[in-house]
Amino acid sequence: MSIINMQRIAVIGLESEKEKLINQLMDFGAVELTDQSAKLSDENWAATVVPDEDQETVSLLEGRINRAEQALEVIEKYGNLKNPLFKTRRKIKEDRMEEIISGEEEFAGRTDFILGLNDQISQATEKLNKLETDTVSLNPWAEYDLPLELESTRQTAVYMGVLPAAADMTALANQLEEEIGTVAFRVVSSDKDMHYTAAMMPKDCQEEVLATLKQNGFSQVSFKGFEGTVSANLKRIEGEKEELNSTIADIAAEIGANSNLKESIEEYADMLTIRLDKEKIRSKLLKTRKTFFIEGWVPARCVEDVKVILDENGCYYQFRDPQEDEDVPVLMENSSMVVPFEAITEMYSLPAYTGFDPTSIFSIFYAVFFGIMLSDAGYGILMAVACFVILKKFDLEGTMYKMIKLFFYCGISTTIWGALFGGWFGDIVTVFSGLFLGKEITIQPIWFNPLDDPMKLLIISLALGIVHLFTGMGIKAYMQIKEGKWLDAICDEGFWYLTIIGLIAWLGGGMVSPGLTGIGKWMSIIGIAGLLLTGGRHNKGIGKITGGLGNVYNITSYMSDILSYARLLALGLATGVIAQVVNTMGSLFGDTVVGAIVLVLVFIVGHTLNIAINVLGAFIHASRLQYVEFFGKFYEDGGEPFNPFRKKTKYIKIEEDK
Amino acid sequence: MMSLIDGNTLALLGAAIAALAGIGSAMGVGIAGQAAAGVIAEDPKKFGKTIILQALPGTQGIYGLIIAFLIMVKIGLIGGNMIELTIPQGAYFLAAGIPIGLVGIWSGIAQGKAAAAALQLVAKRPDQMVKGIIYTAMVETYAIFALLVSVLIWLRIQL
């Protein structure tokens, strides 16, 4: 419903009590400590205090957390564990936490064990890669049957080498034959880049042979460190590869068998994270030799509880209201029905501390808009049931919880609107009954079918839009009045109310009662006159006239804002028509068995696609109507979220046992 | 020549023009797909996020399909015999096809470009993805309006 009031807190305490206080504040989890480094640039402060931080411990802990995270990744990779659809934090009892702390060595050992196995795998993989390159370089020489270490005999020299594929091997062989004669030249193999060749010759003509070869682009290849023939080597490498592969598989299996360590390593990592946060928070402390100083924010309602903690630790403290130029962190508070819609507000940007949290007001509009845009009872029921099951099955938190709950509400809204407009998976009942039962049964819409009377839904959409916009303007007026700016509220919002209502009555009121036209005419004339006269009230000289004209010209932006709500109709029709297209396509094969199978398949695939596209569309456009049309009228954003000092664990949720 | 142009050909032309919105979607999805592949090269885990953004410019093609389908149903091309249309009636159907057909082409391309930019945003700040989606969906507004105009014309055609 609102933004929670904050209190600024400043505390001086004894160094000896510091650790206990930090622990208690963390357990309490409702105090945000602010950074104090700015104070150190002040001479007076700098002369008496130093920041309290211990970089070494921080980096030590960070290193350990890193190792634990790596170990978890390794388990994830080789463990074949089933990944749940949503990651949730496991609940553990508080005394379990103490067990983890006292068994730290053992947990660190488990981490090392997993990482050790992983190291073995990477060593084996490295060797495997080396063998792989060897195989690649040996393969072209498979037909070469001399031992690789043989480079010369007493009388002869042996050269192995490659020539570019462009070189003509027959011509080269002939040339060698003609010019030197006593040389055995052999092309071992060729591929698209190279010829792999070997040449054997008496030592006395090796210079000449080499010169001729090099003219043709020969470059020597040597296999240092290899012994025996190529085929023998390839065979050996193949064997070694197999061995390494089985070693890797064995180690991977061992990691897999130890994947039950995952939970304890997660607990260990979280325990370290808590400890790290405690160390890190010290960088926000200033200290002298015997005392320390902290400042921060506390929600006003928690002040009494914080006082108890501070008194217990013998601290001197002060609370005060935030000052005007301070950046106060923002914490929204809403009833549990509205909380899911906070996700939409958070996605835009939190309201400023002095601003207004509109979540509870737009939540109903959001659900209604979403419902009209999706407007299919079948889809709505599917959505609501799926979200309900997820919420029951998973203990979700944070944004994920809000989003799923949001879609649950939107699903209900969609079901209602779908029933009102007569959409149940499009017109599947009509299609199915017409095809297989011989007579068409139609589920009659409770209200009306938008395809029969789109104008009606268009008017409803625009009317809803006007209500939405007027609500936004109302919030703006409320904020202005709260600040004592009565005149602004009348000039900026009051005249617009008058103008827009007047224009509607003038143009459309005749349909309801002829008297409305006249009233509307005068209302809009007074409204526009007011806008014209007051639009430039903050300007000087000629600006007073142009400001007024500019103000009246804004009518176009109001028109476009209102017309923007026509998307409610368009997207609603789109869902319905696509669903009908799907059903019609499914029914094309008639009332045979094949026809029935086709109908089921097309039904499943088509409607899944339609749900995916249109749920995304409805979500985006319902958000857009809030962000652009509604927020644009009043919203002041830019609040920093309240980020209290608490246990920020990733895998476990510690339950206090009382 | 004149015998070619009767009400039915005009109506079918309308359906064909409506389906042209697919050009915009194809190009838009293509542009977004290229950007998405670039993002995936850096971080394959973002596939789920990128596929949503890539799909956004795809809706114009669907809107075009809707109108084409609606026209074909109303003139009896699907599920029945074609009705004999007068030339003005055919021209109404042609008029119904034009808004979504034309707007679909350009809005699809423009939306594809916006989606590509949003994908760059996802590459650097994955937490800000929804804002990228909203920017991209802004373009969609005009395709939705075109769809609306097409549907309203189609609805008012008397046979």
Image: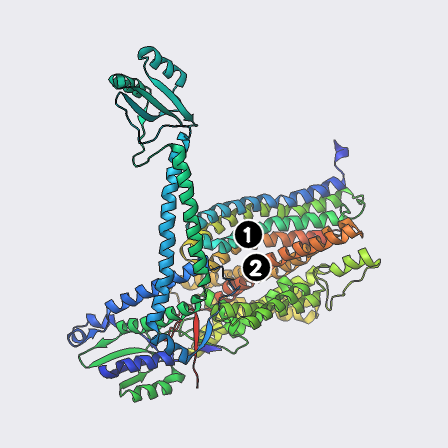
Identity of the amino acid at label 2? Leu
Which quadrant of the rendered structure holds the C terminus of chain A?
bottom left
Question: 10 Å neighbourhood of mark 2: few (<14), some, or many (≥20)?
Answer: some
Please say if A446 is above or below B35: below
Q: Residue at x 77, y 59 (%)?
A: A430
x and y percent of residue A19 in the render? Answer: 28, 80
Q: Nearer the viewer, residue A109 or B118?
A: A109
Pointer 2 and pointer 1: residues touching (CB < 8 Å)?
Answer: yes
Indicate which disc residue B55 carries.
1
In the rendered image, which quarter is residue A138 located in?
Answer: top left
Question: 10 Å neighbourhood of mark 1: few (<14), some, or many (≥20)?
Answer: some
Please say if A372 is above or below A302: above
One can see residue A494 in this view: no
x and y percent of residue A389 in the render? Answer: 59, 70
The residue labelled by disc 2 is A616
**Name of the residue lying farthest toward the left:** A47
Under tag 2, what secondary structure? helix
